[in-house]
Amino acid sequence: MNLEYSHKPNYFLNAQLLINHIVGYIKKHPDATNAIFDLRDIYELFRQDLASTTTNLEGILNIADEYAVDTLNGDQKIISAYKVDAENNSLLIDFNQDALQALKDGKNFIAPDATIQQ
């Protein structure tokens, strides 16, 4: 008997989950210019996928920081900077101010093309 299985992480799905979480955070905290998320919350967000929360997190963040919003100054990325702070078990995210305002104004985000790998 041969059992074939594989666990292929879906970086784009997890990036989408993370961006939806960030947009929800922005709606709840309209004065925020940045956010600090506990990695345990990210672990729950990724449906308790430990690999996505640890080893693959950088790849997921590289996709998530490509999400943009249409602003008066053209398409602007939502995330301007991020840092994983392993010592404090947290994810620090700085937002692009133009994109942040566009999200607050009700604009939808623009997802990166999943068929193009950068």
Image (spheres, rainbow, N blue to C red):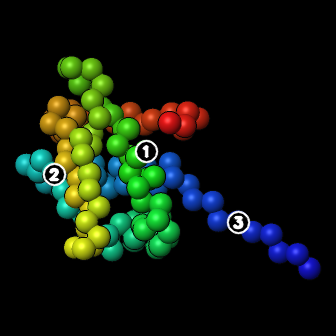
Q: Label 2, on which residue?
A: 34
Residue 20: x, y in percent?
35, 51
Residue extending furthest toward the left:
31
Q: Is residue 9 left or right of residue 94?
A: right
User: Real-space Cα distance between discs 3 and 1?
Assistant: 22 Å
Residue extending furthest toward the bottom:
1
Q: Earlier in the sequence, mark 2 or mark 1?
A: 2
User: Is residue 105 visible in this depiction of the protein?
Assistant: no
Residue 95 picture quarter: top left
Q: Earlier in the sequence, mark 3 or mark 2?
A: 3
Residue at 7% from the left image edge and 49% from the top image edge: 31
User: Is residue 96 visible in this depiction of the protein?
Assistant: yes
Amino acid tagged 2: Asn
Q: In this figure, what is the number of numbered marks?
A: 3
User: Real-space Cα distance between discs 3 and 2?
Assistant: 36 Å
* 19 lies above or below 52: above
Residue 88: x, y in percent?
22, 73
Residue 77: x, y in percent?
29, 35
Q: Label 3, on which residue?
A: 6
Residue extending furthest toward the front:
87
Residue 58 picture quarter: bottom left
* 12 lies above or below 4: above
Q: Nearer the viewer, residue 30 or 11?
A: 11
Q: Nearer the viewer, residue 88 or 30?
A: 88
Amino acid tagged 3: Ser
Q: Is residue 104 left or right of residue 61?
A: left
Q: Are marks 3 and 1 in contact (CB under 8 Å)?
A: no
Q: In what element is the residue under mark 3?
A: loop
Q: In what element is the residue under mark 1?
A: helix
Q: Label 1, on which residue?
A: 63
